[in-house]
Amino acid sequence: MVLPFDEAERAAVYRAIYERRDMRHFMPGAVDPATLERLLDAAHHAPSVGFMQPWRIVRITDRALRERLHATVERERLATADALGERGDAFMKLKVEGIRECGELLVVALMDRREAHVFGRRTLPEMDLASVACAIQNMWLAARAEGLGMGWVSLFDVDEVRAMLAMPAGAKPVAILCIGQVADYYPEPMLETERWARRRPLRECVHENRWPDDARFDAAGRINGDDAPAGPAATPGD
């Protein structure tokens, strides 16, 4: 029988999970190369469907290229604000990235020729993206353990970034990752602090044996008649 981690080891794992944050505010300073190597290795040890390992990571070291990536994100930020309608002004007040300030910038992409991998993807082809998300989460938790901040930027034109990084046909960028030193971690997800959204109670997301009766829930997904708070601030989230 496999033994569990001891109490201190378990606490460290859960601490990394609960304190992980999507960081947008960074301090000046480079990331130690050995630390970056550990983060990349953590990502590379993520689970993947059919062991296809679909993640490809491009490290951005050219300052001009970093500025071009920032520009494409800014264009998408403006387009997103326009698409949000009445919430556009509130969105524009949010800081959504730290591309110019972070110590390291990575672009994570799906590999090309993924159609050759059928194992686990015949009816769920999007499992390649799920595998890449697992790699990013591994890196996120490792970054917290290393005392670094990491932010996932998804506001960009896919074709523009693909061309910018000379990706082959079939490859697809899915994340721009900002990694670096931070003054502190947000005590709760920044979008929760800014009242953009709140964490749902766990019981709204976990059900037994069947999908719940929709009549039990209001338009916001809350259980009818229940005004319980979302939970303590020190929970996993953005």
Image (tube, grey):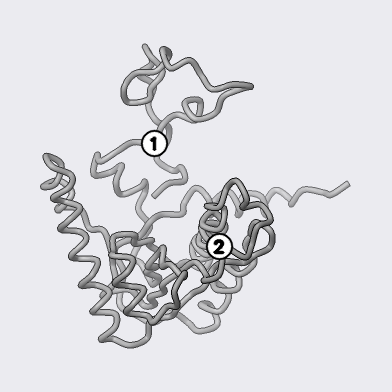
Spot occupied by residue 19 in the image (x, y as percentages of width and height): 46, 51
Which numbered marker is on residue 175?
none
Query: Which residue lies at the image location 46% right of the left edge and 70% below the top edge?
Result: 171
Q: How far is disc 2 from disc 1 in space, using C-alphas?
A: 23 Å
Front residue of this view, candidates 18 and 213 = 213
Spot occupied by residue 39 in the image (x, y as percentages of width and height): 54, 71
- The residue to which callout 2 is attached is 135
187 vs 117: above or below: above
Q: Earlier in the sequence, mark 2 or mark 1?
A: 2
Query: Which residue lies at the image location 51% right of the left edge and 77% below the top edge?
Result: 36
- Specify the farthest residue to the right: 1
148 vs 86: above or below: below
Left or right of 79, for residue 190: right
> Tag 2, which secondary structure?
helix
Left or right of 144, for residue 78: left
- The residue to which callout 1 is attached is 199
Front residue of this view, candidates 188 and 105 = 105
Residue 148 placement: quadrant: bottom left
